[in-house]
Image (cartoon, rainbow, N blue to C red):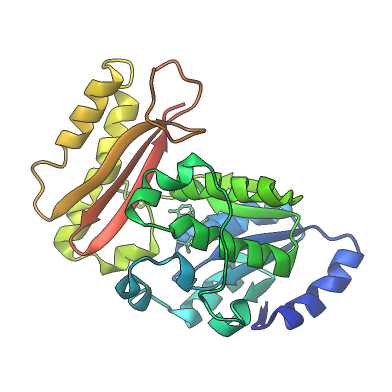
Amino acid sequence: MEVFETKEALNAYLKPLKASGKKIALVPTMGALHNGHISLIKLAKENADVIICSIFVNPTQFTDPKDLEKYPRPIEHDLAMLKDAGCNGVFMPDVAEMYPSGSDENWHIDLGKAEFLLEGEFRKGHYQGVTQIVKKLFDAVEPDVAMFGQKDFQQVLMIKNMLSHFKLPINIITCPIIREDDGLAMSSRNIHLSIADRKNALVLSKSLQFVVDNFDQFSLKELEEKARAFYNTIEGVELDYFTIADGNTLEPAKSKDENSLVALVAAQVGSTRLIDNMIIK
Ligand code: AMP
């Protein structure tokens, strides 16, 4: 497995591979890898010949500087996991390589109304930062396919909107959420959970599963009310939102007959903010 710190070195590696017709996949990550990330690498291998994983903790998508500062960076562990998974190349640039003119460089594109809903409401400017870095990574790699996790449901939608904005010919593949045995969605942030938080964090997957399992029994309003009630009794957990939304627009679902419905949740568990979702249909 090759490791690149500059776009130039990455390009020198990719150029002959592309010339010989190899299909390139990009798996963008912020590191602190777990089996969720590895599932993206494995799916990438089924869809391309050469797999590039990027590891870059992107400053422009963090609204809270403390969150950026405490983001875990176990690089040796990450490289070992990627090598094991059969990744071909790792792109791990520093901030100056990705933002040569400073991280306050100008970037704003129209991502549609969904940018300001859910995560966008709680993390102002988050999706401008996400699309800014993903565009830079797409430009650096020019992949045929790119893998993203359903775990960040809204992010996938925003990336697709960015793609149509720039008319980029990249196939986006969305990968299912990988969970711990007890249902907790894997996340790089889970290491910050205390023993009590870790137990409390199960309320996210449990409340989502409740909605999926009881979808036919109750109205949308009842389902949301009952799911939100899961959070009332748990000390140390604060709900940011629990919503059943139209999977295409992320607007609150108006009817159970809509063709794409997803339940999404975000909650503060101790000092860690977690998100999760389940597709209903
Ligand atoms: P991150 O490093 O957290 O920015 O995540 C990098 C990619 O991995 C994103 O596309 C995430 O949606 C995806 N991802 C994160 N957690 C999981 C998970 N538990 N299952 C599947 N994909 C995930």
Does 150 appear above or below 11? above
What is the quadrant of the N terminus in the image? bottom right
Q: Give the residue furthest to the right.
A: 20
> Would residue 164 appear left or right of 231 to someone viewing this image?
right
> Would residue 227 appear left or right of 60 to someone viewing this image?
left
User: Residue at 53% of width from left, 73% of height from top?
Assistant: 56
Nearer the observer, 252 or 85: 252
Q: Is residue 251 visible?
A: yes
Q: Position of residue 8 (x, y in %)?
A: 75, 81
Q: Position of residue 114 (x, y in %)?
A: 47, 41
Q: Position of residue 19 (x, y in %)?
A: 91, 66
Does 36 appear above or below 104? above
User: Residue at 27% of width from left, 68% of height from top?
Assistant: 192
Nearer the observer, 169 or 151: 169
Q: Is residue 177 visible?
A: no
Query: Toward which corner of the image does residue 251 lie, by quadrant?
Result: top left
Q: Position of residue 79 (x, y in %)?
A: 55, 77
Task: Give the mark count.
Answer: 0
Nearer the observer, 43 or 109: 109
